[in-house]
Image (cartoon, rainbow, N blue to C red):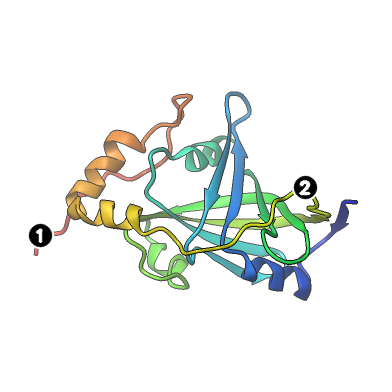
Amino acid sequence: MAKPFPELNAAHIDFIQAQQMYFVATAAPEGRVNLSPKGFDSLRVVDAHTVKWLNTTGSGNETAAHLRLSPRMTLMFCAFVGKPKILRLYGEAQCCHFGDPDWDTVSADFPDLVGARQVFTLAIDLVQTSCGMGVPLMDFQRQREELHDHVRGWGEQGLYDYWQRRNRESLDGHETGVPDLKASDE
């Protein structure tokens, strides 16, 4: 049975920190709904009403585009080991892109992941838990490094060029806000 909470409590935070992956859902007022799995060491609980997560380069950039049109976001965590449980965080989010003036401050709590593209900060207005009895039991092996290895091979300018070619618009043609960057001359 689902149970609502106005904020994160200590048990929720412990559960979140024990998960190896989570899911992010966003939608513009019209068009496709996006649902993305996330891994790595990419999520931080800031306080009982706030989480932030680091987004790395991917084939699309739906979350950033959707937030420009509607700030709604849901994060979902599932117990794939141990007692069954699902935890959802609902709220409104803001985006900070790599290259934005406050990037260094906003991203300082995260490891230096190759291809880091945005930090999303979610202001939580509802926490909900549910049973999770339909979620399968699965064994965690490791985080995949293929994405980081692939992006590292592009070099800095190759990464920025990819963002311009593949990450400037959503599937529905909405702007993502990815800045136009040039590699530093060293």
Q: Secondary structure at mark 1?
A: loop
Residue depicted at 46% across the width and 66% down the height = 106
User: Seen from this angle, which residue lies furthest left?
Assistant: 186
Mark 1 or 2 closer to N-term? Answer: 2
User: Does residue 15 appear left or right of residue 141 in this picture?
Assistant: right
28 relative to 82, above or below: above
Residue depicted at 49% across the width and 37% down the height = 62
The one nearer the camera, 123 or 135, is: 135
Say whether residue 99 is visible. Answer: no
Q: Position of residue 130 (x, y in %)?
A: 83, 53
Q: Quadrant of the C terminus?
A: bottom left
Judge the density around disc 1: few (<14), some (14-19), many (≥20) Cα neighbours within 10 Å: few
Q: Which mark is residue 185?
A: 1
Q: Position of residue 127 (x, y in %)?
A: 78, 57
Quickly name the residue at label 2.
134
The amino acid sitting under disc 2 is Gly
